[in-house]
Each structure stands twice: as C-alpha cells, then as structure tokens.
Amino acid sequence: MIGIIEREKLNQSDKAKITPHIEYLEKELSFLEQYQKEIDWKIYQSNRSKRLEVERWVECIINATLDVSKMFLTIRGESIPDTSREVLFLISSRIYDKEEEAETFSELARIRNTLAHRYLDIRWQDIKRFFELAPRLYPPFLEYMKKELERQRNNQAGF
C-alpha cells in the first residue's frame, strides 16, 4: 500500500481530508467584515467574551491554514518544514509573485503564537494586523488550494 507521503497525485481520500478545511476557512472568513466593524480597541479591552471570541476565531483560522498547507505538502510528497512560519512561507511562495507577500503571509504564524502568550495590548495589535492582512492574502490562498485540488482531480482517471 502506497502511503500519502509517497504519492504525487491526490486521490479521493486526500480531497476528502482537505476540502472540509478549505470550506471551513471560506465560511469563517465570511465573518471578517463583521468582526472588523464590531471590534475596536475599546471593545477588545472591555468586553472579555468578545475578546476571547475573536482571539479564538483568528487562532482557528490560522490553525486551519496550517493544516491545509501541511496536508498539501504531505500529499505532494514534500517535507514539512520545522516551523509554522516556514510552512506558510513555503506554500505562499507558490501563490504570490513577490517574496514580500510570502513573508507577510508567513507572519500569520507569529500572530497565532502571540495570541496565546502576550499582554492585552500586544494581542490587539495582532488582531488588527490579521484584520488588515486577511482580506488581501486569503483569497489567493484559497483560490490556489482549490485550483490545485481541481488540477489533481482532472489529472486522474476516476477522480
């Protein structure tokens, strides 16, 4: 039996693993505009439940992004880099034409890490940064992943 890591093409099982993560990202990112309108520094610092909600939301989106990226690399038989930042940089360097954009996308790993370990004002800066980056960086990421899934599917008989 050939393992997922030894294959270069996706099979139905691979698609079944990645697709729910992509759909989750699309669904959750649809709430971005709502959070951008609802949450400012004043709300963030004074409303504990809203603060915890948005922090968890951002963290889950970034974790799902990492999951999709690692699955994609594994399915393609590529090594998984040691750090989350490197994973995101490797994937995003295939998506964005400019290295600066890939670096910016990989910043999501730092945002996820600081949400769990920093003081209120620093976490808020990361939430604001996510609000700023997500509308620009996620559409190409999701588009790339969906196109790759479709390309792989079209390259296989019976897929």
Image: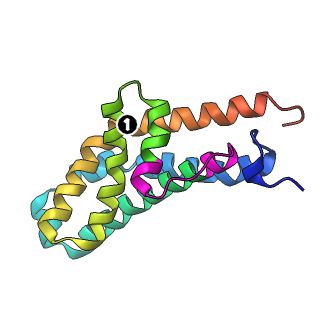
Q: Is residue 81 magenta?
A: yes
Quarter of the figure with the C terminus: top right
Where's residue 19, x and y in %?
Answer: 65, 48
Horizontal side, residue 143 vs residue 88: left or right: right
Within 10 Å of disc 1 (Cα), the crowding (few <14, some 14-19, many 20+) is many
Where's residue 120, x and y in %?
Answer: 15, 70
Where's residue 61, x and y in %?
Answer: 43, 56
Q: Magenta region: which residues? A: 71-87
The quadrant where residue 52 appears: bottom left
Question: Between 10 and 58, which is closer to the camera in this rendering?
Answer: 10
Where's residue 37, x and y in %?
Answer: 22, 49
Q: Amino acid at mark 1?
A: Ala
Q: Is residue 13 magenta?
A: no
Q: Can residue 3 be spotted in the picture?
A: yes
Q: Coloring scheme of the render?
A: rainbow
Question: Between 95 and 131, which is closer to the camera in this rendering?
Answer: 95
Question: Between 36 and 127, which is closer to the camera in this rendering?
Answer: 127
Residue beneath the point at 69% across and 47% down? 75
Height in image: 127 above or below 104?
Answer: below
The quadrant where residue 53 appears: bottom left
Question: Between 62 and 97, which is closer to the camera in this rendering?
Answer: 97
Task: Give the residue at the far top of this rendering.
Answer: 97
Residue beneath the point at 44% across and 47% down? 88
Residue beneath the point at 36% across and 67% down? 56
| Residue under label 1 | 102
